[in-house]
Image (cartoon, coloured by chain):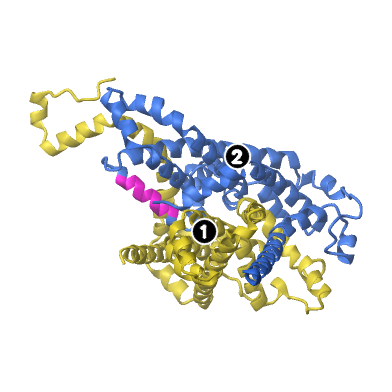
């Protein structure tokens, strides 16, 4: 027994050390990004892996107040506005659609809608942007917030999560309301909506995180940097606006840190939602 | 408004064929569901079905006329062109190789990480490790891929600084073809493995504990329990993760645009990136022919995996 527990303990220690290394590998790039945004280029060249900046050099944060002729606050506003608007529309539209498809999958036309949605999910999301560019062009929505927001509000993963939730509602709940003579509208408003509030919050949160990340559709549909969001501005800095390393790290930090904070506060909900959407029945 | 049962009007109803009468009243009775689904249907049609159909149509037209009201149809010419383009063929094989490598790497390491994280001795540390692993899934890839690009830089990247500290030779990162390919395999792994790990972790928590107890009573060692008790029960999770991973990695795109731009010497020129660069050259016909080919591959693979999975369930 004794030798076994010694062996168990050394295995446990090994597991600890290994997972500490893995955790470091996943957190270090974020730390490096933040530290680098406060260090001058010269200091970086001398000592690339210093864990703390030698002094808080905030030059880069001043320099990126205007980028490519556009103020940083406009990129930030675009990010918040486009993300919130697209996610609100996505949650509303997808929740209603998922509910209708869950309740009456066999109504005339519903199968077609489901099929169309499935195809949209299968089409390589990045490449869908190419024909969407043509559609947005034909609709005359190139270079408008409306064009960007409409495309971003089509969010397949939210649909999977919502359908998964609706399936978990006990059938008896709806059946008994029907027996009591409730109309479908009443069932929806008085029974389904109230119990859906937590899932709607989760789905909104995940939609927010996913839309905040978006860049290609915005880059393609926007016609000028005035409509760019933070990630798109960051990417244009990566290519067009030269290679000011420190400034790039500063903008990357501004794009990422709010999301990290939001995620840390809501991790249970977010991870639970992702899992529910992925493990579909 | 409130009457949900259609009022039968025998005279009028008799004039219509029975089937239509039935369908019509069915639609009317369920009008609330049509109202609920209308915005969703409109969005799916305008931003999903229409672009996909238009994409397939444009893949049959001449690029110069694709955006005009009366495009010239060249039918399969774009497909013939891309399949006689060596760059396309090599990008196709490269994408498939990358996908196979990444799926195997991600699913096996995610399974291993989940098994380690669920062990009793890591009870305290597991939540923090889980969060760290999941962080890249939710943070903007535009930022994380740029950070990795610089981490691999020769001059002030952290990767080479670490290697030098340990007395190891420099890693060329994205500057040499083979190294660039594996750099992308690694960075994509870093970006996605947390998602698959969390799926496995959740499924591990749902396992039947009595089976494990029984195996333990019989004196099975840890590795035997992992192989003979846990992994067989995780089969559905392995299947789901593999499907997701296949679809995920076939579409690999952002990391290429941000870190390598397809180079050096086309070593990271993946299918979706090549299609996108054709699109940037306004070569819509060929770009969409490539997109359609990738779409067909994704559908084909999804169907195969789904069928296989269904069969496996009945064993």
Q: Are marks 1 and 2 on the same chain?
A: no
Q: Is residue A192 magenta?
A: no
Q: Position of residue B6 (x, y in %)?
A: 19, 25
Q: Is the stretch drawn in magenta largely helix, strand or loop?
A: helix
Q: Which residue is mark 1?
A: B200
Q: Is any part of residue A78 visible from this angle?
A: yes
Q: Chain of mark 1?
A: B
Chain (blue): A
Instruction: Read off the magenta span.
Output: A111-121
> Mark 2 falls on what kind of element?
helix
B168 or A95: nearer the viewer = B168
B87 or A260: nearer the viewer = A260
Q: Is residue B67 left or right of residue B252?
A: left
Q: Please give the name of the residue rendered at 90% of the width and 62% of the height, measured from the top-left corner.
A: A42
Q: Please give the name of the residue rendered at 47% of the width and 35% of the height, measured from the top-left corner.
A: A92
Q: Which residue is mark 2?
A: A82
Can you say which quadrant of the picture contains the C terminus of chain B?
Answer: bottom left
């Amino acid at each position: 027994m004794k030798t076994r527990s010694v062996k168990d303990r050394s295995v446990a220690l090994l597991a600890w050390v290994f997972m500490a290394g893995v955790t470091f590998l996943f957190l270090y790039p974020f730390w490096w990004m933040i530290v680098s945004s406060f260090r001058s280029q010269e200091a970086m060249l001398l000592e690339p892996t210093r864990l703390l900046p030698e002094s808080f050099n905030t030059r880069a944060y001043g320099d990126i107040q205007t980028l490519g002729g556009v103020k940083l606050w406009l990129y930030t506003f675009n990010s918040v506005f486009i993300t919130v608007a697209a996610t609100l529309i996505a949650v509303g539209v997808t929740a209603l659609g998922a509910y209708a498809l869950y309740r009456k999958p066999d109504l005339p036309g519903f199968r077609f809608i489901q099929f169309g949605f499935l195809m949209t999910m299968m089409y390589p999301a990045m490449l869908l942007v190419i024909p969407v560019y043509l559609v947005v062009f034909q609709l005359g929505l190139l270079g408008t917030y409306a064009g960007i927001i409409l495309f971003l509000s089509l969010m397949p993963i939210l649909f999977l999560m919502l359908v998964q939730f609706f399936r978990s509602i006990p059938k008896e709940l709806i059946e008994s309301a029907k027996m009591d003579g409730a109309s479908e509208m009443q069932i929806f408003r008085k029974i389904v909506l109230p119990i859906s509030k937590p899932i709607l919050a989760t789905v909104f949160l995940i939609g927010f995180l996913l839309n905040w990340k978006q860049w290609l559709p915005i880059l393609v549909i926007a016609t000028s940097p005035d409509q760019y969001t933070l990630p798109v501005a960051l990417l244009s800095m990566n290519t067009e606006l030269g290679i000011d390393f420190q400034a790039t790290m500063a903008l990357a930090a501004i794009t990422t840190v709010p999301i990290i904070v939001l995620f840390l506060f809501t991790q249970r909900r977010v991870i639970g939602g992702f899992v529910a959407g992925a493990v579909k029945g | 408004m409130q009457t949900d049962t259609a009022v039968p009007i025998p005279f009028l109803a008799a004039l219509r064929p029975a089937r239509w009468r039935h369908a019509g009243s069915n639609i009317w009775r369920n009008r609330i569901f049509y109202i609920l689904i209308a915005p969703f249907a409109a969005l799916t049609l305008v931003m999903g079905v229409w672009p996909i159909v238009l994409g397939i149509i444009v893949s049959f037209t001449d690029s110069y006329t694709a955006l005009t009201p009366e495009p010239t149809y060249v039918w399969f010419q774009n497909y013939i062109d891309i399949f006689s383009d060596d760059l396309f063929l090599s990008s196709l094989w490269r994408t498939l190789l990358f996908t196979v490598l990444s799926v195997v790497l991600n699913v096996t390491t995610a399974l291993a990480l989940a098994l380690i994280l669920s062990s009793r001795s890591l009870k305290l540390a597991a939540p923090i490790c889980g969060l760290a692993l999941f962080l890249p899934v939710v943070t903007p890839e535009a930022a994380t891929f740029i950070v990795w690009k610089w981490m691999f830089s020769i001059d002030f990247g952290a990767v080479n600084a670490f290697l030098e500290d340990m007395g190891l030779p420099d890693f060329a990162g994205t500057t040499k073809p083979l190294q660039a390919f594996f750099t992308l395999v690694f960075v994509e792994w870093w970006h996605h493995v947390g998602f698959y790990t969390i799926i496995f972790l959740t499924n591990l928590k749902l396992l039947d504990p009595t089976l494990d107890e029984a195996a333990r009573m019989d004196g099975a060692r840890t590795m035997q329990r992992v192989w003979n008790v846990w992994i067989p029960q995780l089969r559905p999770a392995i299947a789901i993760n593999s499907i997701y991973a296949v679809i995920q990695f076939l579409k690999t795109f952002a990391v290429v645009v941000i870190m390598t731009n397809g180079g050096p010497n086309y070593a990271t020129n993946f299918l979706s990136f090549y299609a996108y660069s054709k699109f940037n050259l306004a070569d819509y016909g060929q770009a969409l022919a490539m997109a359609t080919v990738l779409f067909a591959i994704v559908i084909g693979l999804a169907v195969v995996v789904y069928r296989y999975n269904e069969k496996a369930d009945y064993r």
